[in-house]
Amino acid sequence: MATISDVIESFIKELIRQSQGHPIEIQRNEIAKHFDCAPSQINYVLTTRFGTQHGYYIESRRGGGGYIKIMRLKPERNRPLHQMLMEEIGNETTKTQANRLIQAMEEQNMITKREAVLMKAATSDGVLVSPINNRDQLRANILKGMLSAMLH
């Protein structure tokens, strides 16, 4: 059974799909009223499911009927995508963060399902064995190397 977060995510993704590549603008309070939930629930969905690691750019304006602008990142139209992804990964990344990024790339058809499986395998805890327990640093470096090869 879908949670309210899943339903809100699906709703926003459908709005994005219908926009045919254009940014969408939504008002947090209006979406919250539509789903009969707190505006903080909308914030939660946006933060956990629509960040750069998921392939989206979010711009927020508060006050005076503020809005949230959401845009799907496209590598062929968005030159700084590589840089944004490298900054998002940083010096360390967890398995969950890496898997979210890989999933977003697959959903955007930037990589194939097979490439996603290979990337997830290469960044899994099972293969990142280190005597000094620096898995998250190794994972970030491997993921950055793979993304650099794929995006350039």
Image (cartoon, rainbow, N blue to C red):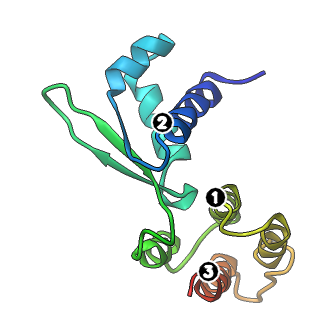
Residue lying at 45% horizontally and 13% vertically, measured from the top left: 34
Q: Which residue is mark 3?
A: 147
Front label number (2 vs 3): 3
State the SS at label 2: helix
- What is the three-letter code of the residue carrying label 1? Gln
Whole-number angstrom distance, CA of label 1 to CA of label 3? 14 Å
Place residue 8 in its image quadrant.
Answer: top right
Q: Residue at x 68, y 62 (%)?
A: 109
Query: Looking at the rendered structure, which numbered label has been put on residue 121?
Result: none
Find residue 57 and report its horizontal and vertical position in percent. Answer: 41, 55
Give the side of residue 65 with respect to residue 130, left or right.
left
Give the number of the mark in front: 2 or 1.
1
Give the residue number, with chain letter if any, for mark 2: 44
Task: Give the residue displayed 64% in from the left and 66% down from the top.
Answer: 94
Q: CA distance from mark 2 to mark 3?
A: 27 Å
Task: Please identify the quadrant where the N terminus is shown.
Answer: top right
Q: Position of residue 10 (x, y in %)?
A: 61, 32
Q: What residue type is disc 2 on?
A: Tyr
Q: Give the residue drawn at x 62%, y 63%.
A: 101
Of 128 and 54, which appears nearest the observer? 54
Distance from disc 2 to disc 1, alpha carbons, whole Å, reads 22 Å
Q: Are marks 2 and 3 in contact (CB under 8 Å)?
A: no
Compared with residue 4, is residue 24 higher up or lower down, i.e. above or below? below
Q: How many marks?
A: 3
- Report helix, strand or loop for mark 3: helix
Q: Position of residue 91 (x, y in %)?
A: 51, 80
Q: Quadrant of the C terminus?
A: bottom right
Residue under numbered circle 1: 108
